[in-house]
Image (cartoon, rainbow, N blue to C red):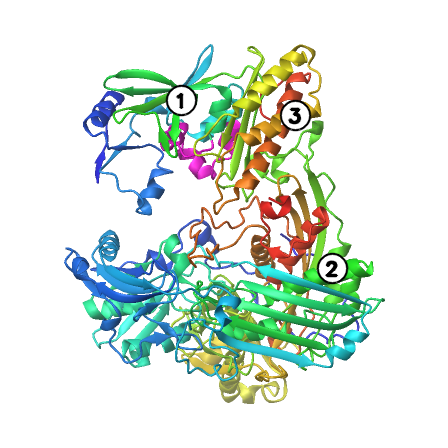
Amino acid sequence: MDFLRPAGWEEALAAKAEHPTAVPIAGGTDIMVEINFDHRRPEYLLDLNRITELSEWEVGEESVRLGASVPYTRIMENLRTELPGLALASHTVASPQIRNRGGVGGNLGTASPAGDAHPALLAAGAEVEVESVRGTRLIPIDEFYTGVKRNALAPDELIRAVHIRKADGPQQYSKVGTRNAMVIAVCAFGIALHPETRTVRTGIGSAAPTPVRAEAAEEFLNAALAEGGFWDSGKIITPSIAKQFAELASGACNPIDDVRGTARYRRHAVGIMARRTLGWTWEQYRGSGRTLEGAA
Amino acid sequence: MALNPRVAAVPAGTPTKVTQGSQTKGGIGESTLRPDGTLKVTGEFAYSSDMWHEDMLWGQTLRSTVAHAEIRSIDVSEAVAMPGVYAVLTYDDLPAEMKNYGLEIQDTPVLAHGKVRHHGEPVALVAADHPETARRAAARIRIDYAELPLITDEASATAPDAVLVHENRDDHHIGHVPHPNIVHRQPIVRGDVAEARKRADVIVEGEYVFGMQDQAFLGPESGLAVPAEDGGVDLYVATQWLHSDLRQIAPVLGLPAEKVRMTLSGVGGAFGGREDLSMQIHACLLALRTGKPVKIVYNRFESFFGHVHRHPAKLHYEHGATRDGKLTHLKCRIVLDGGAYASASPAVVGNAASLSVGPYVVDDVDIEAIALYSNNPPCGAMRGFGAVQACFAYEAQMDKLAAALGMDPVELRQLNAMEQGTIMPTGQPVDSPAPVAELLRRVKSRPLPPERQWEVAGGEADVRALPGGLSNTTHGEGVVRGVGYAVGIKNVGFSEGFDDYSTARVRMEVVGGEPVATVHTAMAEVGQGGVTVHAQIARTELGVTQVTIHPADTQVGSAGSTSASRQTYVTGGAVKNSCELVREKVLEIGRRKFGSYHPAWATAELLLEGGKVVTDGGEVLSDLVDVLEDEAVEVEAEWRHRPTEAFDLRTGQGNGHVQYSFAAHRAVVEVDTELGLVKVVELACAQDVGKALNPLSVVGQIQGGTTQGLGVAVMEEIIVDPKTAKVRNPSFTDYLIPTILDTPTIPVDVLELADEHAPYGLRGIGEAPTLSSTPAVLAAIRDATGLELNRTPVRPEHLTGT
């Protein structure tokens, strides 16, 4: 196994172009586990730790450009207002040590359905900035996950950053694990209200081969909120709407039975989380404070 | 956490204190600090996995990928040919006639012979100059398996055409077991259940399932074997009982015991998982073969295959009671799955059977406990040892009975609670304090944590105090509180006639103008605090401040196992005894030197305190320095507690146990009833410890045991696929143990009712809190949900019907 240590981004892109099988490593919180267990033995490891700009972020007008290696701890500490859903998701990642090392770029690169960041990215709306010696492109998050642990990256591309829409309304994130901390998701749910466009977006983790949006649930809710004039009135969402939303979210799952939980439980739990998080975000929206920050 | 100061209120009729006070600082009863505490917290402590030796090789074990198979062939040629590989060993390379080992029954092959009986069984060994090379070489060994039918439960084990896990058994249990796939069976019959059953106004039955728990010690199996010039080997290893290891290692190496010299290295937890051998023989074989030091360190994955687990169990219980709540009778059948090799299964069966009634008075019982041989992972010792599974079931039954009678569950328990003088189902009288009702009273009388304790100012929720924690699954929705109680009984020390002794060598001399004691035992310090307690005992008995604890090794007699809550009792007893013998010799010297100067030398009761010889009236006769001068006094002596007897194989009668230990818990939980997630808010414990030699350590042990019991209540389980008998979750990613966010407040109420038979009146404490913690949490979850919940651990699926 060769260890490539580019000093800068251009050099990294060149290395990736030369060795398309090279596996990029930043925090190493996922890759090193695979290597230590001998599950994976890449020909080349491409160390991105010398590329400082990957650990930086810029808050723009519309979105946050979050460097691929910005650790979860930084997101929790610095981006709670702009990215409340992702900040809540970051809280649920492993342990403090792992959160100090791991970043969203790793979650995207691995593209595991259990990655904690995915539902928050799907709900907020995001684009993944990828680059190769051939140039840069932005992949919409909805098109990024292509299969179990597969993504839309070309072999010569590296993830530079992710552009996440700044919250224009409340966001929430819930994750079920069988321990109260440091646990892989049995399933997870993210929700973001977008009052500017009067839409709601969602994301489901660990309950299908890839992270998915609960599209039917979103469409139903968007129509119901518009029809009932809820965005203007700010009145309480009727229990029947919440129930229907939850059922449709549950129906968006395509889970498996595994050692962490049953498919039936995952469907059930996603429905509960959908109903609760909708309630929390809507309360925040209609509440006097209209705070954008997650409650956790 | 501070000790609860309200430990007075000793019930009438309990013996008075048998402990003696001491003027010497750092003696028994003080919370002296662990010498290794700071090192461990700061990461500087050297564990067995940290050892290194010049020119050292790394050993690697190749393990079976299937659970039950004939080995048709093993091809090591590719592995041997790899550069950096020094040796590859299989069964055919074993040097001596003895090729098996085992704690009680020598049924475990050092390396598989023609057959593997469980997933992860060692088949071959590699030594190489780099661990990675060793691992890769092991992967190149080709094994041709022909799979055999699987024995995975009682039905498949005892089916008419069942394959035998062990053919040609010749152990001492084969004569009395109903089937060769049953390791051991222990019935207990007392009174007349059929008659007593007629008096019952209420009868409750239940079928209970206990999942397979892992000890999950943090320091994986590891050690270093160094070949010696005399043809022997020096083995540095983390274990629980050096001499038991030695007894099993030497015959397989073909060496006399004195040529296998063992030294305890840094142990990162044990909980029963280091009673059986793991890498000991393998490292020695490779070292003797290559002539080089060989180190073996398991990773976490391998560790799950490298030690036995807690027996999973199926338990069927029937309890009867009169309308006023008095137990009439008890019937139970306990089926423990021992897996592929016997390990400690026979003793676990004895414990499960003899403690199956719990700390209650029941005159008419019909009990049966068995352990199976199967192709599941081998199971053996783990903290609580058979008593844990039984406690989970009988405490669920007591709640069920209380509900059927319309009685308060704590009152029902108190009404039937055993006390000093109660006769056990084995016929053995309980001849020291058994404050069962009082322990329950204490946990019940504590104020409850406030309702909706997660609410913070402004109506917001602190999710850390809710089920799901920072995963943010509820802000109070669906959350219901539940409260549950449980109490348990555990034996202390090795039972059933085992010669359970310990040895201590104590030396006293003057060093640098000060009297110093050295305590040398073979006790394995696995975290229980023996290193602290031995020094405290020496200070109290010998009146010195400076005590050196010699590293544990086989150059001194056996200390017995660091198991069964026994080390403070037995090796503590041995240290006390040897100190007393040293003291006699010192006083002898004193009398010889100074007897003529003061009549008290001949007439008074003399003590050693604060570096001086004093009379019991407090008069100083001499400085120890002057008594000893250049002389060193040294004694090595064995010490035994009262002997026990075997249980009768048909009736289970016999004075089988040394001492009993009791703890009670009250669990307060918040359950998210919609998501099936649990937050244990508080887990209060009351325990009688006889005498707290080190109160801080006592509380630490109780909190640790309580947490381990919580783990198997809500998350800890090794999941074995019933179709393949393979372990599905051998990692800390999927075998979950409680984190600090899962660990509740654990207030501890310590009683000190002396057992007059034990040194200082002490009671072994390490296991009792592991028993009652699990059923208390289950009871609290049942209270919150109204569900029956007859299995542990409880998973979200069980609470949500999904």
Q: Which residue is mark 2?
A: B400
Q: Which mark is residue A242?
A: 3
Q: Nearer the viewer, residue B627 or B503?
A: B503
Image position, residue B750 (x, y; %)? 67, 62
| Residue kind at label 3, given as amino acid type | Ala
Mark 1 closeness class: few <14, some 14–19, many ≥20 residues within 10 Å: few
User: Mark 3 and mark 1: span between their CA atoms?
Assistant: 28 Å
Indicate which label's residue lies in the foreground, 2 or 3: 3
Q: Answer whether residue B716 is visible to the viewer in this image.
A: yes
User: Mark 2 and mark 3: span between their CA atoms?
Assistant: 38 Å
Q: Main secondary structure of the magenta part?
A: helix
Image: magenta residue range: A87-116
**Label 3 element class:** helix
Indicate which label's residue lies in the foreground, 1 or 2: 1
Q: Quadrant of the C terminus of chain B?
A: top right
User: Mark 1 and mark 2: span between their CA atoms?
Assistant: 55 Å
Q: Which residue is mark 1?
A: A143
Q: Is residue B669 magenta?
A: no
Asked if marks 3 and 1 touch (Cβ < 8 Å), the reply is no
Image position, residue B301 (x, y; %)? 38, 53
| Residue kind at label 1, given as amino acid type | Glu
Q: Is residue A13 left or right of residue B249?
A: left
Instruction: Give the mark count.
Output: 3
Q: Chain of mark 2?
A: B
Q: Is residue A144 left or right of residue B537?
A: left
Against B132, residue B568 (above or below) is below
Mark 2 closeness class: few <14, some 14–19, many ≥20 residues within 10 Å: many
Q: Answer whether residue B757 is visible to the viewer in this image.
A: no
Q: Residue furthest front?
A: B161
